[in-house]
Image (cartoon, grey):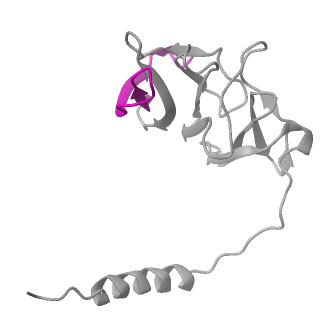
Amino acid sequence: MPVFTPRPIFAAFFLFVQNVSAQDMIWTNPVPVADKSFGFSRPRVVVNGQDEPIFLWSNEASHKIYVNRYVQGQMLPPVQINPPGTSFFGATWAGPELAASGQDVYVVGKEQPEDETGVSLFHSGDGGSIFSELNNIDWATGDDLSRFPDVAAGSNGEVWVAFMRFAPDFRSPDMWYQKAWIKDRHSLRM
């Protein structure tokens, strides 16, 4: 019986590391995104069609979702995108996700209590400046529960949302997705 040797795998890994380390990268000094009072659970970043970074995070204590943009060399004030009175799941290990394509920016999250609500999607058609009211996407059927949503944005105005679906006892997980298109750049059809 032939003996497995890890040499080919090691060689591929080494070449990958060698190629990455050979690239020249010049980093700027760190720039604070927001005051610590906003909380910083599970930060995310994407770049919009204007090459402006958009930052996303949640406040684990207040259950709020924040976005912030760096525009023309200035960090703008953070904006809460979930409506007042709503509570969204956010922790260091899971929480809202962010995607962008051109000037379309999407945030997907799970409203709380998680076992009573569906997945929610926010959309910005202006590069992350203003977000829509939340679009409730309730894929749960019967007693099923949805959790851990993720989002991806296509270049033709489509948005993909993936999530896990569980039985009421949080067993028997499987993965689902749904796709939507922007009709008029101001509304979203799911």
State the image quarter where residue 66 is shown.
top right
Q: Is residue 26 above or below residue 124?
A: below
Q: Can you give x and y, in whole percent of width and height, for residue 178 in the image?
A: 37, 25
* Residue at left offset 86%, top offset 53%: 32
Snapshot quadrant of residue 29: bottom right
Residue 189 inside the magenta-drawn segment: yes
- Observer-nearest of 120 and 69: 120
137 lies left or right of 174: right
Please say if 52 is above or below 25: above
Along the line of sight, which residue is nearer the eye, 168 or 44? 168
Quadrant for the C terminus, please: top left
| Residue at left offset 78%, top offset 44% | 40
Residue 26 percent location from the top left of the image: 71, 75
Q: Residue at x 72, y 40 (%)?
A: 57
Left or right of 141? Residue 8 is left
How far from the left and from the top, in percent, is residue 100?
Answer: 55, 39
Answer whether residue 161 is visible to the viewer in this image. no
Residue 59 makes an appearance in the image: yes
The question of residue 93 being in magenta is answered with: no
Q: Which residue is the extreme one toward the left? A: 1
Q: Is residue 38 above or below residue 62?
A: below
> In the rendered view of the protein, which quadrant contains the N terminus?
bottom left
Taking depth in this image into account, of 77 and 120 the one nearest to the observer is 120
| Residue in view at x 43 percent, y 86 percent | 14
The magenta span reads 163-190
